[in-house]
Amino acid sequence: MALYSEKVMDHFRNPRNVGVIEDADGVGEVGNPVCGDIMKIYLKINDQQIIDDVKFETFGCGSAIASSSMATELIMGKPVSEALQLTNKAVTEALDGLPPHKLHCSVLAEEAIKSAVKDYYDKNDIEYDPADFPEEHDCEACHVN
């Protein structure tokens, strides 16, 4: 059995939505000091709170790039409230799985999106439940030395 699915390899080799949105409505950046992965997500959101554009910059392994790419595809054109519900499990499933020691990459993708949404809410004085934005992630793979 291959270590990575065809979808992971496709999103690694041909990542979607790579880049920067200069006038982004929300920007989120997260990182994992254990593995060194860093993800930055940019959101462009319209007046109906629909994500019109999303871009990412990721410094990290192939799984981190694939997770970022897939996560952006999953939230493009969606309401902000729906993007906020995206889970690392959904990213992993959309990629047809990740090796257990790479699951933290999907966790970072989820966190980067939530961080960008929080930034959008903060910039626009939109009230939100702080519980939707946990301070620390809980990923066993992230704590492996």
Image (tube, rainbow, N blue to C red):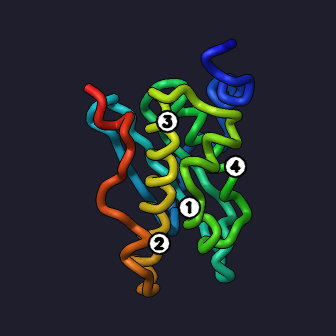
In this figure, which residue is indicated by the disc labeled 4? 73
Q: Position of residue 66 (x, y in %)?
A: 60, 33
Q: Which mark is residue 43?
A: 1
Quadrant where the image shows the C terminus = top left
- The first of marks 1 and 3 along the sequence is 1
Q: Determine whether the residue tagged by mark 1 lies in a helix, strand or loop.
A: strand
- The first of marks 4 and 2 along the sequence is 4
Verify CB contact (< 8 Å) between mark 3 and mark 2: no
Task: Classify mark 1: residues with Cα within 10 Å, few (<14), some (14-19) or many (20+).
Answer: many
Looking at the rendering, which quadrant does residue 76 occupy?
bottom right
- The first of marks 2 and 1 along the sequence is 1
- The first of marks 3 and 2 along the sequence is 3
Looking at the rendering, which quadrant does residue 8 occupy?
top right
Q: Determine whether the residue tagged by mark 2 lies in a helix, strand or loop.
A: helix
Residue drawn at x 45%, y 53% as measured from the top left: 112
Determine the CA span between mark 3 and mark 2.
Answer: 26 Å
Q: Position of residue 125 (x, y in %)?
A: 41, 86
Verify CB contact (< 8 Å) between mark 2 and mark 1: yes
Determine the CA span between mark 1 and mark 3.
Answer: 24 Å
Q: Which mark is residue 120?
A: 2
In this figure, which residue is indicated by the disc labeled 3? 103
Q: Amino acid at mark 3?
A: Leu
**Residue nearer the viewer, 85 or 37:** 85
- The first of marks 3 and 4 along the sequence is 4
Kindly report which numbered mark, 1 or 4, lies closer to the viewer in this rendering: 4
Determine the CA span between mark 1 and mark 4.
Answer: 12 Å
